[in-house]
Amino acid sequence: MHENRGTPMTTHDDTTVDVPEMPAPRVREFTAHSIGGGLALLLGLLGLFAGAGMIAGATAVPATGAKAALIVGGILVGLAAFLAMCGLNTVAPGEARVVQLFGRYRGTIRQDGLRWVNPFTSRTKISTRVRNHETAVLKVNDAYGNPIELAAVVVWRIEDTAQATFEVDDYIEFVSTQTEAAVRHIAIEYPYDAHDEGGLSLRGNAEEITEKLALELHARVEAAGVEIIESRFTHLAYAPEIASAMLQRQQAGAIVAARRQIVDGAVGMVEAALARISEQGIVELDDERKAAMVSNLMVVLCGDRAAQPVLNTGTLYQ
């Protein structure tokens, strides 16, 4: 059994991303042979008028053989002109025509306007406009096993019309399925919040994660001739069953961080106060008085509520 393994790709920050290896395309887009449709339309109309004129002129010819020849000739000229005009097709801006002749790919018409090609060919219309696809809200487990919900939007367009037509059954469904697969794969590779210092997380490193998502999407849909213009997460949250617990954990982490900053600031202020008292000789403090002063300042600076002064009518040692 042949197994396709992921191919590493490198982002701008020199990190590698494992992407699936897709089969090489068997057909590439090239320009179909066509001419301006104005001249072809004029010649076709002239042929129709000529055929009609020959049939009308046959009524004025007395000879039976000549009359039959003119009628047959007029019919043939009219049919040839009509058949030739079947090769006319209009191409609007943002559209293309994939041309096939008896099942073989004969090129793509991208030039807008009225164009003429071989009337025996089939022309399939395909849009080359920019599109967007938004996934439904997906529920997956992140790298830590926590259930999360996320959704993404992808901006894309057809870059190679031949690949989009012949390499996949339905390129729109293909992009939709591969987008969902890429979003799920990225979600299980990274945690929602990183517990390790400097680790990547879905919430904290949105730019890096979306870049990796774009690289993986490009590798997945390249075989269908699709160009990924941009990809972004539109929804990212913990699943409802653990959202409350995770919110409490985030609040606890924020409280701890705030307390740590308060304590660091209070220690600096106490050190500055003791140094200034010592330099200016305001009062002589022994170790016990310094300990009492440090304790009182830390209580005042780190407390949640305003300090209530207590008057000491005795001495520090009583």
Image (tube, rainbow, N blue to C red):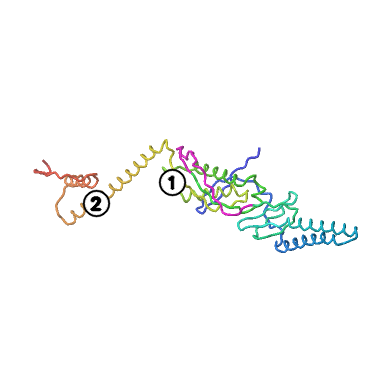
Q: Nearer the viewer, mark 2 or mark 1?
A: 1
Q: Position of residue 110 (x, y in %)?
A: 65, 58
Q: State which quarter of the image contains the N terminus.
A: top right
Q: Is residue 310 left or right of residue 9?
A: left
Please give the name of the residue rendered at 74% of the width and 52% of the height, measured from the top-left corner.
101
Please give the name of the residue rendered at 42% of the width and 37% of the height, measured from the top-left corner.
240
CA distance for labels 2 and 1: 35 Å
- The circle on residue 269 is 2
Q: Is residue 297 left or right of residue 130?
A: left
In this rendered view, identify the residue nearer to me: 59 or 89: 59
Q: Residues within 10 Å of mark 1 (few under 14, many from 20)?
A: some
Tell me which amino acid carries mark 2.
Met
In this rendered view, identify the residue nearer to me: 122 or 139: 122
Tell me which amino acid carries mark 1.
Arg
Q: State which quarter of the image contains the C terminus.
A: top left
- The circle on residue 2 is none
Q: How many marks?
A: 2
In what element is the residue under mark 2?
A: helix
- The circle on residue 203 is 1
Please give the name of the residue rendered at 45% of the width and 44% of the height, measured from the top-left corner.
236
Q: Give the residues in magenta.
A: 126-150
Q: Residues within 10 Å of mark 2 (few under 14, many from 20)?
A: some
Compare marks 2 and 1 and give the one earlier in the sequence: 1
